[in-house]
Amino acid sequence: EAEVAQSPRYKITEKSQAVAFWCDPISGHATLYWYRQILGQGPELLVQFQDESVVDDSQLPKDRFSAERLKGVDSTLKIQPAELGDSAMYLCASSSRLASLGGEQYFGPGTRLTVT
Amino acid sequence: AQSVAQPEDQVNVAEGNPLTVKCTYSVSGNPYLFWYVQYPNRGLQFLLKYITGDNLVKGSYGFEAEFNKSQTSFHLKKPSALVSDSALYFCAQGGYNKLIFGAGTRLAVHP
């Protein structure tokens, strides 16, 4: 069964350092999402791609966060500089149809980020 | 604005008993509703979804959910709980182009 791949699974970094996360969606899925999940809360969307284009980045803190999906396949989320409040689980998901059209999203295992 | 409410932080059930995890959604046209499960240090796994049609939706691992438009609810159910069902459960609503998640309900099934 196809899965969404993410790496690394765990990352510890000091504040003010740069950190990057990678995601490889299920083959053929045009839509890719990055979510942030703070402990005890539901995931919140950071950025959504349709192929290589950003569809929604309204909740992405653009002063420190950036995301790209250059060839419309895998994607990288970067934080620079990291802050203590960025400690969270970062989840990547992909889907073949938009949620507004009833498409379910498939999630990767996530990257647990700890900023010290 | 769309929102999803899961009124219970935790649900405790004895193994073998039926379980219900509650979810209510905001009214905005015909809702697309989803349930996901999350095990410790893992991503979310899709369980089931309601798009249209039959109000009782069957999903993975013996779970089902009942859509009730008049009560704007989409409760997750299982006739007989297993200890292995213990996890964090999220209800979500399909918004314009994204999922709106509830805060989650922790299900604890005791032997």
Image (tube, rainbow, N blue to C red):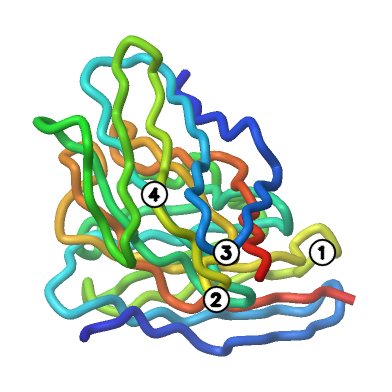
| Mark 2 residue element | loop
Crowding around mark 2 (Cα neighbors within 10 Å: few <14, some 14 to 19, many 20+) is: some
Q: CA distance from mark 3 to mark 2?
A: 23 Å
The type of residue carrying mark 1 is Glu
- State the image quarter where residue B88 is shown: bottom right
Mark number, residue B35: 4
Q: Nearer the viewer, mark 4 or mark 1?
A: 4
| Mark 1 residue element | loop
Q: CA distance from mark 3 to mark 1?
A: 43 Å
Residue B26's x, y, as percent? 43, 19
Q: Chain of mark 2?
A: B
The type of residue carrying mark 3 is Glu
Q: Mark 4 or 3 closer to N-term? A: 3
Mark number, residue B87: none
A34 relative to B40 in the view: left or right: left
Q: Are marks 4 and 3 in contact (CB under 8 Å)?
A: no
Q: Mark 3 or 2 closer to N-term? A: 3
Q: Nearer the viewer, mark 1 or mark 2?
A: 2
Q: CA distance from mark 4 to mark 3?
A: 21 Å
Q: Nearer the viewer, mark 3 or mark 2?
A: 3
